[in-house]
Image (cartoon, rainbow, N blue to C red):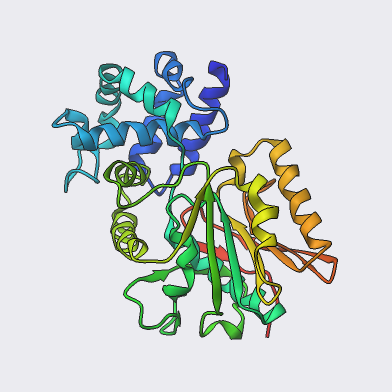
């Protein structure tokens, strides 16, 4: 990727960070103007979001090393960080001091954010699926990373009222704002889940200290609540019975579906993953879903395929239905709900 395109990526990322990470907003705007730093990011693996990879690699190295003044700007490392507007010279110095290590990370790692709060918008969608078919759900997540979202039915949910949905006895309560639309009435209890399969090119094992550190490095510095949630969910995942498989999820899909009983409803889902797919891989995935749908019922819940909306496509008795569920905030803090229900 040429320097101009890399610069645009960081300008765009700066806009995405507004109101959420002042540090990354300021740094992104500065990096966009710095050809030396942009040249470092050229080592990023094809298909990976470049700003996320660079910031993840830097925070990963900061968490590993003993000390550097750049740490003083990270809320993830100090209680009262220095002003973000003063950070760039230290950031650039750090990148060049650890250029070799950062380059190795950019070449080898993947952006595999386990943002469990996204389950707040997945939960009503899965409830909607169950109302349609009334069969236990067999979950297949593409781009599962460490499998946090496969446990969506074990969490509790709050949507701005006193009412708690999902597993009301759960220690983990996920909160989100519904900015538009009325959630369905059939959400009180989670639907039954019979199978949980997670697929990824690289499975992150939260018992592995290096994998765990990389996943935490992908969390934006100011997001204290996300780090706290990560630690709680990671502990729960360690004790869960998840089937996590390393490999090409799209290629493996037909064989995995063939092994699932017709007494179960197959639900293939992925969030903030398809933007890393090539157009060819996107078409292959949709063709796989279509082919399976000609033989059995199947649901496909996803975003970031061709736009940022959450979509639900499904095949029932060979007929296809497509819905736009709504708009979703990247970290699951809010969403809109467009589906009608009882």
Residue at x-position 33% and y-position 52%: 206
Vertical position of residue 174 compared to residue 80: above or below? below
Horizontal side of residue 172 vs 291, given as left or right: left
Q: Quadrant of residue 278?
A: top right
Horizontal side of residue 307 vs 52, given as left or right: right
User: Percent position (x, y) of residue 213?
Assistant: 29, 43
Residue at x-position 44% and y-position 14%: 35
| Picture mark count | 0
User: Percent position (x, y) of residue 34?
Assistant: 42, 17
User: Percent position (x, y) of residue 69?
Assistant: 17, 29
Q: Quadrant of residue 105?
A: top left
Quarter of the image with the C terminus in it: bottom right
Residue at x-position 43% and y-position 80%: 167
Vertical position of residue 140 compared to residue 66: above or below? below
Horizontal side of residue 16 vs 76, given as left or right: right
Tell which residue pokes out farthest to the top in this image. Answer: 36
Q: Is residue 206 visible?
A: yes
- Using the image as rendered, state which of residue 262 and residue 6 is in the foreground: 262
Q: Is residue 311 visible?
A: no
Vertical position of residue 234 compared to residue 168: above or below? above
Tell which residue pokes out farthest to the front in this image. Answer: 259
Vertical position of residue 331 compared to residue 40: above or below? below
Quarter of the image with the N terminus in it: top right
User: Percent position (x, y) of residue 320?
Assistant: 82, 64
Residue at x-position 40% and y-position 49%: 20
- Using the image as rendered, state which of residue 222 and residue 115 is in the foreground: 115
Tell which residue pokes out farthest to the left in this image. Answer: 66
- Using the image as rendered, state which of residue 45 and residue 18 is in the foreground: 45
């Amino acid at each position: 990727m040429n320097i101009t395109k890399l610069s645009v990526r960081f300008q765009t990322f700066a806009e995405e960070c507004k109101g959420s990470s002042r540090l990354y907003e300021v740094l992104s705007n500065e990096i966009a103007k710095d050809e030396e730093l942009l040249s470092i990011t050229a080592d990023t693996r094809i298909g990976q979001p470049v700003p996320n990879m660079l910031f993840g690699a830097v925070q990963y190295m900061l968490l590993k090393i003993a000390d550097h003044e750049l740490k003083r700007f990270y809320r993830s490392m100090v209680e009262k960080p220095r002003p973000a507007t003063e950070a760039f010279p230290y950031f650039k110095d750090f990148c060049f001091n650890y250029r070799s290590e950062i380059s190795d990370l950019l070449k080898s790692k993947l952006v595999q954010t386990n943002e469990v709060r996204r389950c707040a918008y997945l939960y009503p969608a899965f409830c909607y699926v169950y109302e349609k078919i009334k069969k236990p759900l067999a979950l297949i997540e593409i781009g599962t990373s460490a499998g946090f979202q496969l446990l969506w039915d074990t969490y509790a949910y709050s949507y701005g009222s006193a009412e708690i949905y999902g597993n009301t006895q759960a220690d983990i309560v996920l909160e989100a704002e519904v900015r538009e639309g009325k959630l369905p009435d059939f959400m009180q209890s989670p639907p039954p889940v019979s199978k949980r399969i997670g697929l990824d090119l690289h499975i992150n094992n939260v018992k592995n200290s290096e994998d765990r550190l990389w996943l935490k490095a992908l969390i934006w510095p100011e997001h204290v609540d996300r780090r706290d949630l990560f630690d709680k969910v990671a502990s729960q995942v360690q004790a869960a019975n998840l089937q996590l498989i390393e490999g090409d999820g799209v290629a493996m899909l037909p064989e995995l579906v063939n092994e699932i009983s017709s007494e179960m409803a197959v639900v293939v889902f992925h969030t903030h993953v398809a933007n890393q797919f090539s157009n060819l891989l996107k078409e292959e995935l949709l063709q796989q879903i279509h082919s399976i749908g000609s033989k059995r019922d199947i649901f496909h819940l996803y975003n970031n395929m061709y736009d940022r909306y959450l979509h639900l496509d499904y095949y029932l008795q060979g007929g296809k239905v497509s819905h736009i569920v709504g708009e979703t905030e990247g970290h699951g803090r809010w969403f809109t709900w467009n589906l009608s229900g009882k």
